[in-house]
């Protein structure tokens, strides 16, 4: 039930005008996809797998963040499906990454992010430099004041809504 809450749709409209125009025209479709996503068992199962394995990675979240950034935030971006290691996070990534990469391509998204309620980005298809950082306004992440940080805060403030954040 709680996994159906806190979804935010973020666009980076001023960055790519053509992408913005296309995205703006398809807003109803994107909102429908999000409604379908939050009611599906797929998102619930993926979130559970990533959250549990994130929490188990190390008792110190700073160690988890640094280790996962080192292993996943590489030049391979979305092509990186699997890395070496016995931690359960790698199994979750191996099981779910191709699923969310396909959704990203099929829907023309810039990226797909999964956050926990503490503000940690526990999954991203592209895993850029903001991957495995914290976005909570009161947290310590370098992007907490970004549009993505605003999206996290909006989702937490109105979990039954689909906020639209133009950043």
Image (cartoon, rainbow, N blue to C red):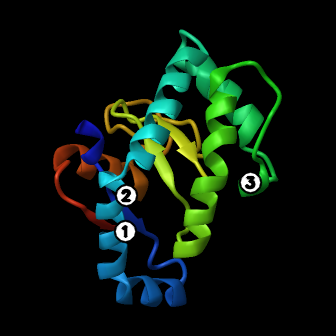
Q: Which of the pair 166/97 is nearer the observer?
A: 97
Q: Compute the Cα span from label 3 to label 2.
A: 23 Å
Q: Quadrant of residue 10?
A: bottom left
Camera-side mark, 3 or 2: 2
Badge 1: residue crowd in 10 Å (few <14, some 14–19, many ≥20): few
Residue 47 sits above or below residue 26 on the image: above
Residue 43, image x, y percentages: 42, 47
Residue at 54% over, 82% down: 16
Q: Earlier in the sequence, mark 3 or mark 2?
A: 2
Query: In the image, which disc is placed on residue 33?
Result: 1
Query: In the image, which disc is placed on residue 24?
Result: none
Residue 68, image x, y percentages: 67, 31
Residue where numbered disc 2 is placed:
37
Q: Quadrant of residue 157?
A: top left
Query: In the image, which disc is placed on residue 77?
Result: 3
- Side of 68 where 2 appears, left or right: left
User: Do the numbered discs 2 and 1 sit on residues whose CB atoms are within 8 Å?
Assistant: yes
- Can residue 26 be seen at all in this image of the molecule? yes
């Amino acid at each position: 039930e709680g996994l159906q809450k806190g979804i935010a749709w973020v666009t980076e409209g001023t960055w790519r005008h053509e992408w913005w125009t296309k995205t703006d025209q398809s807003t109803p479709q994107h909102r429908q996809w999000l409604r379908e996503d939050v009611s599906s068992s797929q998102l619930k199962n993926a979130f559970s797998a990533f959250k549990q394995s994130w929490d188990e990675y190390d008792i110190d979240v700073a160690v988890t963040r640094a280790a996962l950034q080192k292993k996943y935030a590489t030049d391979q971006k979305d092509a990186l499906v699997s890395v070496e290691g016995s931690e359960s996070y790698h199994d979750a990534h191996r099981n779910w990454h191709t699923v969310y990469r396909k959704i990203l391509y099929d829907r023309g998204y810039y990226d797909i992010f999964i956050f926990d309620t503490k503000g940690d980005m526990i999954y991203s298809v592209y895993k850029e430099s903001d991957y495995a950082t914290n976005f909570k306004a009161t947290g310590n992440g370098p992007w907490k004041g970004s549009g993505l940080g605003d999206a996290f805060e909006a989702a937490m403030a109105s979990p039954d809504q689909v906020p639209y954040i133009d950043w």
